[in-house]
Image (cartoon, grey):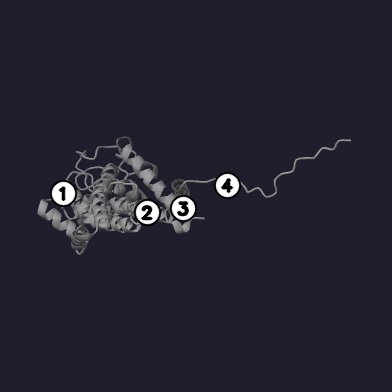
Amino acid sequence: MTTSTASTPLLNAEPITEHRSPATEALRRLLKHRSAQAGLFLIGALILVAIFADLIAPYGFREVFRDGKRFEAPCVHLLGCDPAETEHLFGLDGNSRDLFSRVVYGSRLSLMIGLVTNIGAILVGALIGAVAGFAGGWWDTVLMRSMDVLMAFPSLLLAIAIVSALGPGLINALLAIAVVSIPVYARLVRASVLSVKDLEYVQASRALGASPIRLLFTRILPNAVTPVLVQGTLGIATAILDAAALSFLGLGAEKPTPEWGLMLGEERARALSNPHLLIFPGLAIMITVLAFNLLGDGLRDALDPRLKR
């Protein structure tokens, strides 16, 4: 008589777990973060507005209405405005231009300001901080004391001084904003390099004969960029605010550039009589800055290793 034995599952088998890379895990936490979700939504909407500004804006940002009307209140047909009147969602500014169209086109300029100034500041600041932290010695002393001198001045006042010396204009304003942002990134990268350069995998690469440049750019810097990503996101919001402040003072963008700070500066004398001329550009600045701040907070939490589960 033959007996058959049924196969039994292995009782001690370990459950199969999915192994995610650190980048995938950080992205998962970022997408679950409520503040980051709101920030990404607002930034996505801003990018779409900037890309399709020609389709969204009903008029050109330079177009002047020749009927002599100025400082007109918003006219929205769906809200009861006389259909015989020309529709202006945000009204007309002091130069008889459609304010809604200028605010829409201003999104392009704001994104450009934030990205260009931060990319330039990150590249220069990261190079300075990496050299100072990796080389040490007198290199560290000279470079970081120079950064300390720049940080001793309030950033906006230093930007005003630089633009005043170079002359008003958007390009000079972008350069000034980038210069005052360099020390922040230099100090961040230096601190990260100091914490990474003596780790075991760096020492192993050095023992295998890797050159200092190879060590710095392939072993150290790729593992020292986490705080730079967070600060870069927050820095975009700061750059947009600084550019708006310089334009408000007449040191940044020049007429008829559709820059939100310039719009506020042009109509600041009519804050009480025609408040809509300041409300809409001000809301655009507030929403944009809020979006990047929310995303920066989400990035900081997602990239913090102490929050890993």
Label 4 crowding class (10 Å Cα cut-off): few <14, some 14-19, many 20+? few
Q: Earlier in the sequence, mark 4 or mark 1?
A: 4
Mark 3 — residue? 33
Q: Position of residue 142 (x, y in %)?
A: 18, 60
Q: Earlier in the sequence, mark 2 or mark 1?
A: 1
Q: Earlier in the sequence, mark 3 or mark 1?
A: 3
Q: Nearer the viewer, mark 4 or mark 1?
A: 4
Mark 4 — residue? 17
Asked if residue 96 is positioned above or below residue 271 in the image, the reply reads above
Mark 2 — residue? 296
SS assignment at label 4? loop
Badge 3 amino acid: His
Mark 1 — residue? 172
Label 3, label 1: how many angstroms apart (C-alpha)?
37 Å
Q: Position of residue 180 (x, y in %)?
A: 21, 56
Q: Position of residue 262 (x, y in %)?
A: 21, 50
Label 1 crowding class (10 Å Cα cut-off): few <14, some 14-19, many 20+? many
Badge 1 amino acid: Asn
Badge 2 amino acid: Gly
Label 2, label 1: how many angstroms apart (C-alpha)?
27 Å
Q: Position of residue 100 (x, y in %)?
A: 29, 44
